Every structure is written in structure tokens, then in C-alpha cells.
Image (spheres, grey):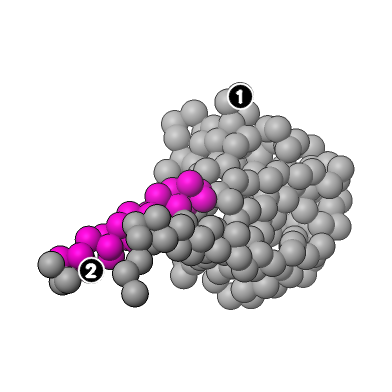
Amino acid sequence: MERSFRQYLMAGTMLAGGAAFGGVTPAAANVCPAAGADTNCGITITLNSNGTTTVTASGQGPYDGVEDTLVGIVNNSGGTVNSVTLSSKTLQIFGFDGDGVSKFTTPTYSTPAGQSYAGFISPTGAFKLSGTLDSFSGITAGKKSGTLNFPGGLVNGGSAFFSLEEPLTAASFTVKTGVPEPATLSILGAALAGFGLLRRRRKTA
């Protein structure tokens, strides 16, 4: 039976929407380990299935009691994320000064730098203190922006932790990822459906 272009368009859009909104895993409460004065993350970043991010504050202050914030990230995007870019308009969140989260984490973990600002990547919403470390790159000259990398990728439902400078709030910085937004996925689905229709018509012509 011959399908209309409208049917192909609807099918493509529905498939794209399912990819965008499916596979969400609830964030766990223990994304970060206890570090210094903090029992969990001071800030938690959640990557959502619609391409947006949610940044929440727990109310816990800097883990060192002065100017360092423990940050957790949970991937609920529906896919694997390789990196995120963190930016602040006013704060030098990447102005690292040698007192990273490893110095204040119990039990402490060993890194080549000794006192790393990186944390470990976990395949679940719960932290772990072994395995692959996340890392930073592309830190700007003003130290207000940089990229957090996940070697091997941060899988859907996975989490990671790290630390940034300054006593941060949920409004202190912005997060940008490469996760497609639903509108982009819908356009892609519609385009694929259109190509399928054209190919079918050429075969029947």
C-alpha cells in the first residue's frame, strides 16, 4: 500500500521524539563523595533528554570552607556525552590553585597531580573512587570557561564529579553540551522520512 508523504513525516517525527525523550534515568542522591565540609555535591548538573541542563544547589557551601565547590553531573540525556563546556560571566571558575577535591575527599584517591580537581566517572548515578578520571581542557585565558571531558564517554544514567573554584550557586555558570535538541531530531527524522519517500517513488516510477 502506497504511503503518503504526510505519513512518512509523522513517522519520522515520532521516532525522533522517542529518541529525544526516552531512556531517562532518575538522578541518585550520592553523585559526589564526602569531601571536606561537604557530605555530597554542592552543585549538581543534570543533562536532560530535551537537550537542556538543570543546575541545582544543595545548600552546602565550599568543601574547603572558603572558595572551592564540589560539583556532580548526571547524564539523563538518553545518550552518551563526551564533554560539556562550563562558562561563567564573572567568576574564575577554572582559576585552580592547588587544593583540588582529591585533597579533601575521604578516602583520598591518588592522581599524578597529587591534588586533582578531577573526579571519577561512574556508569551509574552513584559515585565511585576508582576507574577513569574526567579531565579539563580548553581553559580560557581569563579562566572563566573550559571544557570537562569524559574519556570513554559519560553513558546515559551515568555520573561524574569534580571541583571548581569559587563558592558557586546554581546561577554562577552555564553548561553547554553536544546533545541534540528535540527540534533538531525532529527535523532529522522528517528529512530521513522524505528521502525514503523519494526513493520509493523512484523505484515505482
Instruction: Report x, y in % for residue 116.
Output: 60, 56
Extent of the magenta region? 180-202
Q: Which mark is residue 90?
A: 1
Mark earlier in primary sequence (2, 1)? 1
Q: Is residue 2 left or right of residue 22?
A: left
In the rendered view of the protein, which quadrant contains the N terminus?
Answer: bottom left
Amino acid type indicated by mark 1: Thr
Please tell me whether the stretch drawn in magenta is mainly helix, strand or loop: helix
Q: 203 or 78, which is in the foreground? A: 203
Residue 52 lies within the magenta run:
no
Q: Name, please, the residue furthest toward the front.
A: 1
At 57% across and 42% down in the image, what residue appears?
175
Q: Is residue 153 left or right of residue 160?
A: left
Could you say whether the residue bearing mark 1 is in a helix, strand or loop? Answer: loop
Residue 10 placement (x, y as % from top left): 46, 58
Look at mark 2 in the image and give the residue it sits on.
200
Q: Is residue 68 above or below residue 202?
A: above
Q: Quadrant of residue 131?
A: bottom right
Q: How many marks?
A: 2
Magenta stretch encompasses residue 190: yes
Nearer to the camera, 78 or 178:
78
Q: Is residue 96 left or right of residue 45?
A: left
What amino acid type should be assigned to the residue bearing mark 2? Arg
